[in-house]
Image: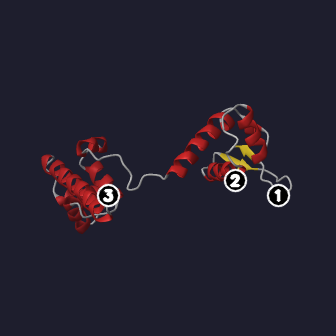
């Protein structure tokens, strides 16, 4: 999907949501001023929301709360759950490695005591969770991501090697 057609579909969904919010407001006999009072959103922003021109999702959420429009009903819009771009094959493989590490290393409390990437790779090979072609670099990348996600932490290094621990 090109950026232009993607932008058009996004504005289409905003326009539909804005229209739906406006109809809820009218069904509840609320004026724009009533919504302004309840949300503390400016009049110009309220008008942009109703036209689907506002880009800040928080504004739509606040407006929806004011008119008691359940955002669960966004299903009505049949928005296809597809990203702008599919992950390339190597990233999909990385997510598989992440899943294996989370399942066999994090969930198994293997990191209760600090472990290096080499320890983690050895354990994954021992339990036949990965192929021998998986590199330590790939495992280290997953471990960095898990640390960034605050699922693990690092302890004292062994030489220059990071030691990973379960949070």
Q: Can you give x and y, in whole percent of width and height, for residue 2 in the image?
A: 31, 62
Category of crowding for the residue at label 3, using alpha-carbon neighbours closer than 10 angstroms: few (below 14), some (14–19), many (at least 20): few
Q: Is residue 80 visible?
A: yes
Say which residue label 1 marks.
Answer: 160
Mark closer to the chain start, 1 or 3 = 3
Say which residue label 3 marks.
Answer: 1
Helix, strand or loop for disc 1: loop
Q: Can you give x and y, in whole percent of width and height, for residue 92 in the image?
A: 52, 47
Determine the CA span between mark 2 and mark 3. Answer: 33 Å
Q: Nearer the viewer, residue 42 or 153?
A: 153
Helix, strand or loop for disc 3: loop
Category of crowding for the residue at label 2, using alpha-carbon neighbours closer than 10 angstroms: few (below 14), some (14–19), many (at least 20): few
Q: Is residue 4 above or below residue 129?
A: below
Picture residue at 73% right of the left edge, 42% below the top: 121
Q: Can you give x and y, in whole percent of width and height, for residue 11 in the image?
A: 25, 60
- The residue lying furthest to the right in this view is 159
For discs 1 and 2, the disc positioned in front in the rendered view: 2
Q: Report how many numbered discs are placed on residues in the image.
A: 3
Say which residue label 2 marks.
Answer: 137
Mark closer to the chain start, 1 or 2 = 2
């Amino acid at each position: 999907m090109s950026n232009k057609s993607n932008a058009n579909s996004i504005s289409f969904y905003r326009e539909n949501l804005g229209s739906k919010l406006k109809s809820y407001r009218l069904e509840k006999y609320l004026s724009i001023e009533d919504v302004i009072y309840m949300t503390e959103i400016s009049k110009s922003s309220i008008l942009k929301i109703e036209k689907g021109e506002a880009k800040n999702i928080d504004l739509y959420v606040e407006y929806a709360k004011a008119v008691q429009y359940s955002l669960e009903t966004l299903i009505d819009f049949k928005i296809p759950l597809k990203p702008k771009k599919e992950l390339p094959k190597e990233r999909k493989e990385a997510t598989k490695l992440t899943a294996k590490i989370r399942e066999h290393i994090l969930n198994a409390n293997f990191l209760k005591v600090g472990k290096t990437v080499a320890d983690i790779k050895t354990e994954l090979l021992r339990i036949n969770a990965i192929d021998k072609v998986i590199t330590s670099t790939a495992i280290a990348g997953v471990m960095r991501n898990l640390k960034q996600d605050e699922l693990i932490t690092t302890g004292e290094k062994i030489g220059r090697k990071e030691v990973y621990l379960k949070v």
